[in-house]
Amino acid sequence: MSKAFNEPSFRDGVNLMVDRAISVMKLEDGVAKAIKACNAVLQVQFPVKIRGKIEVFTGWRATHSTHRLPSKGGIRYAPYADQEEVEALAALMTYKCAIVDVPFGGSKGALLIDPSQYSRDEMEMITRRFTLELIRKGFLSPSTNVPAPDIGTGQREMSWMADTYKHLHPDDINYVACVTGKPVHHGGIQGRIEATGRGIQYAIKEFFRHSEDVKNANMKGGLDGKTCVIQGLGNVGYHAAKFLSEEDGVKITAVIEYNGALINDEGIDIEQLHQHIEEHEGIQTFPCAQFVEQGQDVLEKQCDILIPAALESQITMENADRIDAKLIVEAANGPISFGADDILKKKGIVVIPDAYANAGGVTVSYFEWIRNISHIRFGRMQRRHDQIRGENMTKVLEEATGHTVSEQIRNNISRGADELDLVRSGLDDTMRLAYQEIRATMENDEKITDLRTAVYVTAIRKIARSYIEIGVF
């Protein structure tokens, strides 16, 4: 974020976006304040003995809203984490859950640490100690507050957290639901790793199903052949780019990382690049694209779709006027600052905002939590029934037409849906319906002229209704 332009902080920017939506709604001032307020913030400091010396670590967990339980949100491990960022992300989670009709409140956590400086065993000790603090203070439980992976954390950390909770609460049969994003063999769900990136793909596909919206973004036609610049090839960026390029014909013309960028106007093979990064721990020597040291400048490269999938405040008042994309999809949380958002709107650049676009992660986390609470994997009871019904339908077709159905068609009809199929179907349906609801909000109120305001108006209406119905006010 550029200080030269006196931009608001990330937390203030989120509140300003909420204020803009509230002003359109003419919501009662007291109701608005209650919705914006962060319910509780926990800061912990705890010692861990590392390599013979005591180190003191600082962590946070913010619960923005408990209008629905449990509160839900990731835990990030980062050397730049602070309380203000955690509060902003917790607020975003509240609105995000409301947008996609996931019955959770919003929460977020962080630990001030650089994971690259510690061994696996050291990270386990630190994670278990942090988890202990969260549990003892009532900020981690299957029924009240459920973390998930974020920047710097993953399946490994979630497994450690779940196991720590189990040891403290051995009689809780739902212990495995205390976190989501776990490995499948430890209570996780198929499709969770790819969920946020897959949700980005589904959001973009739904946008392109509405020709009027595509026209407003100065484009026409479908996704096939559209050019895309993506910033950040972590879990979210990698899956979004992979699915869009391999399944929808999108041409990835540039990939931006923290230490530079790659450019190839003919298109970059994302899976090939991913394998290269795994082997060489960087993009500099990738042979199939031009390497540019000033990666941040590549955000300004001309493209149809720009996907910032790295960190917050990457497009600010300093560089917003130079952005040359037609559609920006916020795969990260808060990559566009509040001031930059106004500049982009005046330029006619359409933005699909983070509170909707990257909700795929929490949606599939919800599926995982439900799976853990119900103690049964999705598809277990009906898969064979669906398969038999499909086989019977195939026989009916063959008898009615007098022709033999090909093996491929037979398999497609008779195949019963497994857990991954159901997760992807549920996520696709969620992202489609949410976008249609956002679009309806914008169409029904002439004062709403952009998707971000429509997203917040849609979310705040749901939250306010929930608060009023349960008698909070």
Image: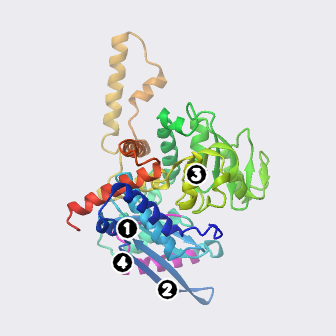
Q: Which structural element holds mark 4?
A: helix
Query: Which is nearer the N-term, disc 2 or disc 3?
Result: 2
Which region of the structure is painted magenta?
122-150
Which circle, 4 or 3, is nearer the viewer?
3
Q: Residue at x 57, y 46 (%)?
A: 349
- Where is residue 241 shown, x and y percent of the image? 60, 46
Residue at image mark 1: 36
Separation of marks 1 and 4 at Cα, in angstroms: 34 Å
Separation of marks 2 and 3 at Cα, in angstroms: 43 Å
Name the quarter where the C terminus is drawn. Answer: bottom left
Query: Which is nearer the N-term, disc 1 or disc 2?
Result: 1
Q: Residue at x 59, y 62 (%)?
A: 311
Q: Which structural element holds mark 1?
A: helix
Residue at image mark 3: 344
User: Residue 46 got which mark?
Assistant: 2
Q: Which structural element holds mark 2?
A: strand
The three-letter amino acid code for the residue at tag 1 is Lys
Query: Few, some or many C-alpha atoms within 10 Å of disc 4 (few <14, some 14-19, many ≥20)?
Result: few
Separation of marks 4 and 2 at Cα, in angstroms: 18 Å
Separation of marks 1 and 3 at Cα, in angstroms: 25 Å
The three-letter amino acid code for the residue at tag 2 is Phe
Name the quarter where the N terminus is drawn. Answer: bottom right
Query: Which is nearer the N-term, disc 1 or disc 4?
Result: 1
- The colour style of the image is rainbow
Whether 244 is drawn above or below 80: the answer is: above
User: Residue 168 got which mark?
Assistant: 4
